[in-house]
Amino acid sequence: MSQVEVSADATKTKVAEEIKFDILAGVPAGGNELKRSQIARTFISQIALVPTKEMYEYALFASLGDDVYHEPSTVQVALEAHVAKITGKEAGLFMPSGTMSNQIGLRTHLMQPPYTILFIMIFYCRYEVGGAGFHSGAALTPVIPSNGHHLTRKDVENNIIYGPDVHFAPTEVIALENTLNGTIFPQDEIIAISEFARSKGIKMHLDGARIWHVAAETGTSLHELLEPFDTASLCFSKGLGAPIGSCLVGPKEYITRARRIRKLFGGGMRQTGILAGAAAYALTHNFPLLHRVHVLTIKLQKSFEDIGVTILSPAETCMIFYDAASIGSTYDEIAERGEALPEPLFLGGSRVVLHIQTSEAAVDDFIKLIATIAEEKRKAGFVNSAVQANGHQDVYVRRTH
Ligand SMILES: Cc1ncc(COP(=O)(O)O)c(C=O)c1O
C-alpha cells in the first residue's frame, strides 16, 4: 500500500481530464474485422497487410529494454543479430521504416562529397522523396535497365563515373533493388555487377525490402542472395506483415556509424521490443506463406491471359502489371466496378499486388470482373489492336483518381 497521501486538487484533476483520451471509444464495433476483410480484397499494395492478433499476442511478451542504449537483453538486439546471421553480414540495425533504412544505409557509405550514387531507376529515385540528394548531398545517376527487366553489368559500365576527370562526381555506391516491381534480379548478373563494382572500389547496397520473395521463390538463402552486396536493407512490414520495421545489415564498423546517424536523423527509439517481437513473428509464421502468394499470382495472370488481357510485366513473385486498354477498359472503370460489387474489391492502376492476406475468393472475383468487362466491351465492338508494350515503358500506370 502506498504511504503517499494524494489530496484531490481540482486544478490538476481538470488538466488530467483534458489530457485523457479513450481512443477505443471512437472505434466502431467490428471496425477492425471490416478492415481485415477489405485487406483480403485489396490488390493495390502489400502495404495493405496488417498485423494479426496472434502477432500482437506474441510480441507482447517481448522484453522492455531501450533501443538507443542498445541494452543487450532487448529482443531488438537479438533480432538484429539474427538478421545479420541469416544474411551473412557482421551486424544489423533495426529501423522504423524502409525509407530510413535505405537513406541511412546510403548516408553511412558516403563520407566526402562530391560523389554519385548509381541507382536502378525505381524506388530510390521516385519514391524516397529525393532523399539521397537531400540527406547525402549525392548526385544521382538513375539507370533504366536496357533489357526492360534488370540492370546488367554493361548498363552499369556504361553509366558508372570513375577516373581522374575532375568534371565528374565519382560513383561511390551502386544501389540495386530485389525484387523490383515483383521481378527477380538474376543472381549471376548481380554477381557480375558486384565484381565490376569491387574492381573499381565502389560499394554495393541493396534495397531488399522484398528480398523475402526472392528467397521464397528461388529457395536461395539470404546469405547467398546478399553476398554480392556490402550492405542491404530488409523490410518486415512489406510482404511479411509486421506493423513497421526494417533492418539494415552490413559490416560491424559500418553499422556502428549507421547507429549514430540513425540517432542524428531522430530514428533512435526506446522500447522497440514489441516491434521486434512482431518482426520475429513475421519471419517465423509469415515467410512460409509467401509461396502460396506466388502461386495465386500465377493463377490470376493465367486467367487474365485467357480472357485476352495484355500482361505488361508477368508474375515472378507477387505482382503483375496489366493493360486495361487491352480489353477496351480503363483502370478507373475497373476499380469503380470492383468497388461497386456486393463484396467490394479494392484495385489500383496497372499494378496488381497479392499478399499473404489475399483471399482466393477475392482473386476469383477479380477474374470474374475482368471477364465480365471484357465480354461487355467485345459485345460493344471492341477489338484489341493495341501495340504491345515494349520493355522501356514504365509499366506502373496509376489510376487517374
Ligand atoms: C522496394 C521498397 N523500398 C523501400 C520502401 C520504403 O519503405 P517504407 O514505406 O517502410 O519507408 C518501399 C515501400 O513500399 C519499397 O517498396
Image (tube, grey):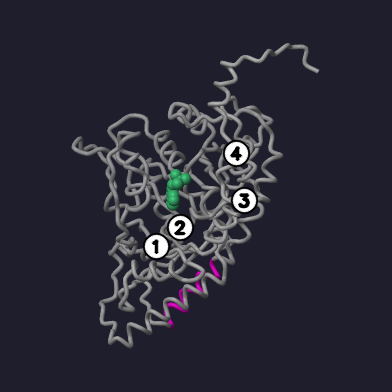
Q: Residue at x 74, y 12 (%)?
A: 4
Magenta segment boundaries in residue numbering? 294-306
Mark 2–mark 4 distance (CA, rounded to whole Å): 26 Å
Does label 2 or label 3 sit earlier along the sequence? Answer: 2
Does label 2 or label 1 sit earlier along the sequence? Answer: 2
Mark 2–mark 3 distance (CA, rounded to whole Å): 18 Å
Q: Check the picture and name the quadrant holding the N terminus.
A: top right
Of tags 2 and 3, which is closer to the observer?
2
Q: Secondary structure at mark 1?
A: loop
Horizontal and vertical percent position of residue 119: 34, 48
Does 158 sit above or below residue 199? below
Mark 3–mark 1 distance (CA, rounded to whole Å): 26 Å
Q: Is residue 166 visible?
A: yes
Q: Is residue 59 left or right of residue 216?
A: right
Q: Is mark 3 within 8 Å of ligand 1?
A: no
Does label 4 or label 3 sit earlier along the sequence? Answer: 4
Does label 2 or label 4 sit earlier along the sequence? Answer: 2
Of tags 2 and 4, which is closer to the observer?
2
- Please report contact status of discs 4 and 3: CB closer than 8 Å, yes or no: no
Does label 3 or label 1 sit earlier along the sequence? Answer: 3
Of tags 3 and 1, which is closer to the observer?
1
Q: Nearer the viewer, residue 266 or 153?
A: 266
Label 1 Cα neighbours within 10 Å, binned few <14 / some 14-19 / many ≥20: many
Mark 2–mark 1 distance (CA, rounded to whole Å): 8 Å
**Circle 1 residue:** 348
Q: Residue at x 47, y 58 (%)?
A: 187
Does 45 sit above or below residue 141? below
**Circle 2 residue:** 45
**Circle 4 residue:** 80
Question: Of the residues shown, which amino acid type is indicated by label 4?
Answer: Glu
- Say which mark, if any, is on residue 282: 3
- Please report contact status of discs 2 and 1: CB closer than 8 Å, yes or no: yes
